[in-house]
Image: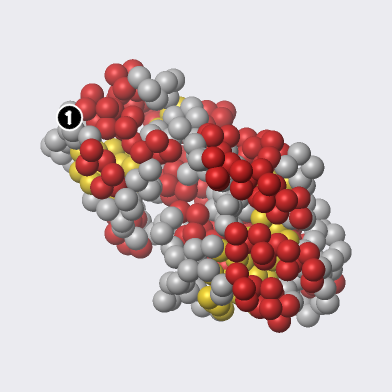
Amino acid sequence: MFVSTAPGRQAGMRRGRHVFDLVHAFADARPVSGVNQFVWQLAGHQAQELKYNSVTVLSLAAPPADPPEGVRVLRVNPLTMGAVLRRLRPDVLHTHSVLRPGLAVLAVAAKVTGTPTVSSPHGGYAPAAIARRNFWKKTYTRFVESARLASIDLHFAYTEAEKRAILAVSPHARVVIVGSGIRKMDADRPAPAPAQPKVLSYMGRGDIQHKGLDRLVEVARALPSYEFRLYGKGLESLDRFSLPGNLRIIGVVTGHAKARALVESSGMVLLSRWEAYGLCLVESMSVGVPVAVSPECDLADMIAGERLGLVLSDADDATASAEQIVKYLDSDDATANALRAQSWADGSGSMAAAAHRIDQAYRSLAGSGPR
């Protein structure tokens, strides 16, 4: 599923085995989403484990107060981005947003300075995501974003499906599949308590259409004997629904609280209408929690093919989905699949593996920079 590029020119490696001067660029670097949390963890891994010469994060919005050790954070604005990039002179510039004018300005500055540029759209070019954009955003995508894409040297995709989505927007783009990764979750699953209801969890943003939260509400309604716990930002958007009594909105959890929420779950359910990856799935896998996903999730093919979890037949059919989930969780398949999924999450799905794939891709560009 994940492909690494072969090592290329390595002039950017001249001061040691893993020496890069690397810049990550966000439109908003606050750790408010799974994407941003992954990039902060990646930057920390690159600084601490891969020992890059320097790792700098540029952000157009206020960054977190406690960045990872070894990572320098600079808050910039579009007017100063070019000057900052010329001063830093990185071996690789890695951008992490779409539809952001500031990043379009940065792409021009990178081209002027000859800085090799990598882009991770993080699912931003999914056909369903583009279809829901208003007229102005679609116009921006066609005339501005497409020009930025054409100037990028290398694009990172999570999956084969995302690679196709990027190529649909920019047919001549060079795309490599690097996947994603998580840090090891330090938590042991408690023994199930027979008298307690089974808990099905969701972790993510409160985007109803994107994340299929309306679907999840109906599945919860069809399973009154299960407790549904929803964790994440913006879930108050569900207030417009008549919510069943077995559904609890808890909000954002991080660190040990997040690990505890995962291990207390009987299963993780993600019913997105499109999903380029789904870090909550891999985090659940890493602690042995069974996962159930809609067929529209890009990881669904791998989950089905590698027998890592349950792929629902039709996430819009709440009754059928509820029956599939109950039957699956009560079967031996759920346990066997969860063990396979845990092994995958500890290997290919780990932060170390993802960072290695990304490092190999950086190497293919190193030496083409401005030094």
Q: Is residue 229 above or below residue 73?
A: above
Expressed as whole percent of the image width and height from the top left, the position of residue 19 reads 73, 74
Residue 282, percent across and down?
47, 46
Q: How is the image coloured?
A: secondary structure
Residue 227 image position (x, y, % from top left): 20, 37
Three-letter amino acid code of the residue under disc 1: Ser
Residue located 56% across and 72% down the image: 77
- Residue 159: tell me if it is visible: no
Residue marked by disc 1 = 225
Quarter of the image that includes the N terminus: top right
| Residue 367 placement: quadrant | bottom right
Residue density around tag 1, few if under 14, some if 14–19, many if 20 or more, within 10 Å: few
Out of 207 and 224, give the one closest to the viewer.
Answer: 207
The answer to whether residue 321 is above or below residue 50 is above
Q: Is residue 6 left or right of residue 136?
A: right
| Residue plotted at (82% across, 73% down) | 370
Relative to 76, residue 94 above or below: above
Quadrant where the C terminus sits is: bottom right
* Depth check, front residue: 117 or 349: 117
Secondary element under disc 1, as helix, strand or loop, is loop
Residue 29 visible: yes
Q: Residue at x 69, y 36 (%)?
A: 168
